Amino acid sequence: MSRSPFFIFGVSMKLTLLEIVQDIMNDMDGDNVNSINDTIEAQQVAQIVKTTYLEMLANRNWPHMHSPFNCNSSSDSSYPTSLSIPDNIKEVKWIRYNKRSITDTKDKYEEITYLQPEDFFDHCSRRDSSASNVQIINLNGMRINVRNDQPPQYWTSFDDSTLIMDCFDSNVDSVLQAGKTSCWGVKNPEWSGLDSSIPDLPAEAFPALVEEAKSTAFYTLRQVANEKAEQKASRQHRWLSRKAWRAKGGIRMPNYGRRKAFSGYEKNPLLDKG
């Protein structure tokens, strides 16, 4: 009896893109290929694998896609409280900033509270724009009053890309620094079309990837349904939905349901795009 290509002695294994394409084409009675570039059909199957992979990552909050990151600084004194999200980050979970003053001897990373854009604007608008500790920044005609004598307390985003903080300490830095951010978020999926590339999934998810791609390939390229592959794909997806985290208890996220200052403001990040 032939052994499943996904398991060695009952343990899930990862496969290269070429191995996945070869397995699918073998079941489709396609040509034997040594590279996905050998035939047009192999390239089509590889594209189906890519689409299936991206759909799988989009449809589930995969633990391995969570990652620490730093924001990018604007380095523009006209926008001293602006930061931006790296292109490879899909969702921001939380942001902390090092509020260490010039007299502190240790770093002071503290969480920056999210406000909805309209609430953030109202919060900043209550400040006296003529005060010496208030600086006006112009965001496409919107005037934001930011304080220049203390570290940031609140943040928002008006465009889902640039982050605006409400304060900065000009005695420490002229603009907020990327290296002083400490953030947690979800990465965007990456894809490489090389023969040797391995899709960025846990080993136990590979059977679902292959069977889902196989079912799609049969229907797309052969115009027939592969009920066996569809059944296997459904079974694997059900199993994955019950799969426990590898780390005991999972990665515990902070409880954003608690209320802080400005009671009633939602804490969930605007940047939850996943």
Image (spheres, helix red, strand yellow):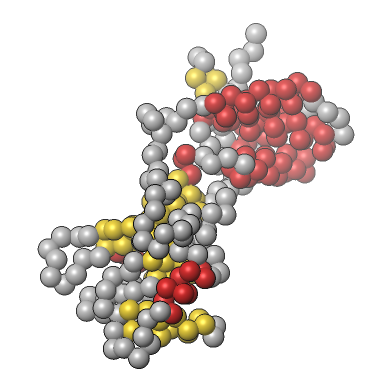
Is residue 80 shown left or right of residue 119? left
Tell me where residue 133 sits by quadrant: bottom left
Is residue 135 shown left or right of residue 47? left
Q: Position of residue 99 (x, y in %)?
A: 25, 65
Viewer-closest of 191 and 22: 191
**Quick one: quadrant of the N terminus?**
top right
Q: Position of residue 33 (x, y in %)?
A: 70, 34
Viewer-closest of 12 and 134: 134
Q: Is residue 38 visible?
A: no
Q: Residue furthest bottom?
A: 130
As displayed, is residue 56 above or below residue 165?
A: above
Is residue 110 shown left or right of residue 208? left
**Which residue lies at the image location 49% right of the left edge and 19% below the top edge?**
11
**Which residue lies at the image location 22% right of the left edge and 60% below the top edge?**
108
As displayed, is residue 156 above or below residue 221?
A: below
Q: Position of residue 244 (x, y in %)?
A: 47, 27
**Which residue lies at the image location 33% right of the left edge and 69% below the top edge?**
152
Q: How many numbered markers are drawn?
A: 0
Viewer-closest of 216 and 2: 216
**Which residue lies at the image location 77% right of the left edge and 40% below the top edge?**
41
